[in-house]
Image (cartoon, helix red, strand yellow):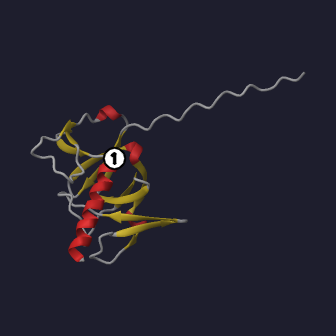
Amino acid sequence: MSAQPRLEPHAAPAAVTGWAVLTLDGLRLALPQRDMVTLELASVLQMNPPGRVEVGRFVQKNRTWSVYALDAALALQTAGVTQRLCAFFKTAGQVRGLLCDTFSLLPQDDDLIAEPLPGCMAQVFSPLDGYVLRENQMVATTSAQRLGAYLEHLLEARHAAAG
């Protein structure tokens, strides 16, 4: 009788924790790291001509992901985009990119303990769900689901205005 090696069950992958903090035209916006897909240099994107809602696309193998740019007021930018990085996040079965000036990671969920937005600041289609003061700067918090819904709202509004 030969000894059979005993196989240990694989441990479940650890849950992704922490925050990705993007700077958009001066606004610091934090999303949970678990919603992030990848970070790319803007130089690898296929940029669209000015005036298009999507400022560009990221094409790799059989994937094409749309890229958007928002300013500090969270309005769509369609021209004059100068951000050097693109953070991709997943929402509702899609991956979307958001151009940003800087990108940093906070490794733990409790690195940002956000306060909910006051009622006077909470707007129906706002992607923001909270804020925190970190290193003497305000950081707005969101989720990929809220950010994706907000982009859809902006795209629908732009389409309705054009049509």
Image coordinates of residue 47 in percent, x first then y, are 37, 72
Residue plotted at (43% across, 38% down): 16
Left or right: where 129 falls relative to 93: left
Residue plotted at (31% across, 31% down): 110
Left or right: where 55 falls relative to 136: right
In this orientation, does residue 153 appear?
A: yes
Which quadrant of the rendered structure holds the N terminus?
top right
Q: Which is more toward the observer, 152 or 114?
A: 152
Residue plotted at (23% across, 76% down): 162
Q: Which is more toward the observer, 29 or 95?
A: 95
Residue plotted at (36% across, 38% down): 18
Quarter of image, res 93? bottom left
Disc 1 marks which amino acid? Ser
Left or right: where 136 falls relative to 48: left
Q: Secondary structure at mark 1?
A: strand
Q: Which residue is mark 1?
A: 104
Image coordinates of residue 103 in percent, x first then y, are 33, 51
Image coordinates of residue 105 in percent, x first then y, are 35, 43
Which quadrant of the rendered structure holds the C terminus?
bottom left
Quarter of image, res 94? bottom left
In this orientation, does residue 80 appear?
A: no
Work out which residue is located at the far left of the displayed protein and give it.
120
Above or below — where is 62 with respect to 110? below
Above or below — where is 42 with respect to 141? below
Image coordinates of residue 121 in percent, x first then y, are 12, 46
Q: Residues within 10 Å of mark 1 (few under 14, many from 20)?
A: few
Work out which residue is located at the far right of the displayed protein and give it.
1
Q: How many numbered marks appear?
A: 1
